[in-house]
Amino acid sequence: MPLEAIRYSRGSLQILDQLLLPQQSRYEAVGSVTQAWEAIRAMKVRGAPAIALVGCLSLAVELQAGAGGPGLAPLVDFVRDRLSFLVTARPTAVNMARAARDLADAAAQEAEQEGATEEAVRERWLQPHLSPQCSLTMPGSLLPQGLGTCTCYKPRNPGAWGFRVIRCAEDMLEKDLRDNQSIGDLGAHHILERAAPAGGKVTVLTHCNTGALATAGYGTALGVIRSLHNLGRLERTFCTETRPYNQGARLTAFELVYEHIPATLITDSMAAAAMAHRGVSAVVVGADRVVANGDTANKVGTYQLAIAAKHHGIPFYVAAPSSSCDLRLQTGQEIVIEERPGQELTDVNGVRIAAPGIEVWNPAFDVTPHDLITGGIVTELGVFAPAELRTALSTTVS
């Protein structure tokens, strides 16, 4: 049975509280944008793709319940304000910001059409005609660019102006899953060609959690590891504990054990030693934002892994869907880096472990310069050198 980070049906949203894993598996209802913001901020749900899904679905739940309005202009303002609020929960990840921008623009365009009313907008938003197999709905503009369209949507009046298209959340989730599987397969074959051209197995080191718990399923960097395992070409995975929230120890280790993938947990500070003494063939990580020149923001600690990998001559890969690529930003210096509460470092499970009075710096992410990404950037569209990324994605990503 696959792991599910998100459960959704029209008017109902539940998330798996990832702070409780692996000791407990408990789903928490999310009935509003405010609750989604709090869950995202607290990292009950995390991972750039999953953050966008939960944020947008929470807005759909509110609208289904009648929030917004009365009147067209207040409804559009409500949509824009709620989306802007969601972006502030975790500003470094680009997926939520892109979804918010697209949906806010769609709402504004709809409001400008002749004869537009609140009732018509809300009805077109929430009550499309669906094929029998599709039970989930959400605005199509929530889809990050490149996630495709829902083929089962039929507008009530094909000649009428409406939101761009209302697509099925099911299609969004299924497309994200297909993209992750493509990332996994493309990355696996690229690593094998680079690190094991004569055959044999490879050992891969990864960081943080980039699996089914961070996406719609399968995962990005962890998807590459899954594909290697499915091919029978994975010797072992080293996963870092990923301080301070231990996503590697709690979540990645949980997924690897669940999937019966051979794996060894190490502390973050052991990574260079593992590269030197444990036969690491490649390093593959995820991304929260990849900019035009290939600079990549990811969980803090990624930068030092890339430096160590380059020193040891080990190819370093970033695995991310094209929806995590932000070609509007030219370099990593433009990425806003979220800083988290110091208590996340000083306390473990509510118990203080640090000396009282010590100052804390706790950035959630760091930026890996493009020249350290020596293996390539793995997307569902192919594996690209950082210098190739802008040209390769410029027709599908903005």
Image: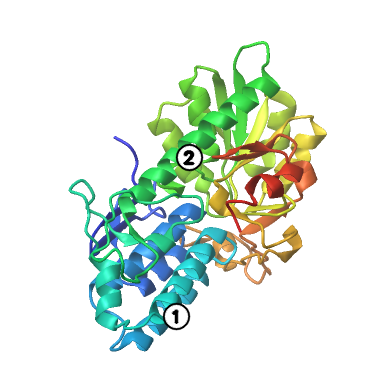
Q: Are marks 2 and 1 in contact (CB under 8 Å)?
A: no
Tell me if residue 50 comes above or below residue 75 in the rendering: above
The answer to which of 48 and 185 lies nearer the viewer is 185
Q: How many badges with numbers are in the image?
A: 2
- Mark 2 or mark 1: name the one nearer the start of the chain: 1
Q: Quadrant of the N terminus?
A: top left
Q: Residue 268 placed where, x, y %? A: 64, 43
Please tell me which residue is depicted at 28% across the width and 50% down the height of the picture: 152
| 98 to the left or right of 215 | right
The answer to which of 387 and 309 lies nearer the viewer is 387
Tell me if residue 96 comes above or below residue 62 in the rendering: above
| 50 to the left or right of 340 | left
Please tell me which residue is depicted at 37% across the width and 72% down the height of the picture: 33
User: Mark 1 sits on what residue?
Assistant: 81
Taking the view exactly as shown, the residue that stands out farthest to the left is: 132
The colour scheme of the drawn protein is rainbow
| 180 to the left or right of 195 | left
User: Do we see residue 45 in this rendering?
Assistant: no
The secondary structure type at the circle numbered 1 is: helix
Q: CA distance from mark 2 to mark 1?
A: 31 Å
Q: Residues within 10 Å of mark 1 (few under 14, many from 20)?
A: few
Say which amino acid is labelled 1: Asp
User: Mark 2 sits on what residue?
Assistant: 180
Taking the view exactly as shown, the residue that stands out farthest to the right is: 311
Q: Residue 330 placed where, x, y %? A: 74, 60
Q: Quadrant of the C terminus?
A: bottom right
The secondary structure type at the circle numbered 2 is: helix
Taking the view exactly as shown, the residue that stands out farthest to the front is: 159
Q: Residue 387 placed where, x, y %? A: 76, 44
Tell me if residue 370 comes above or below residue 33 in the rendering: above
| 396 to the left or right of 212 | right
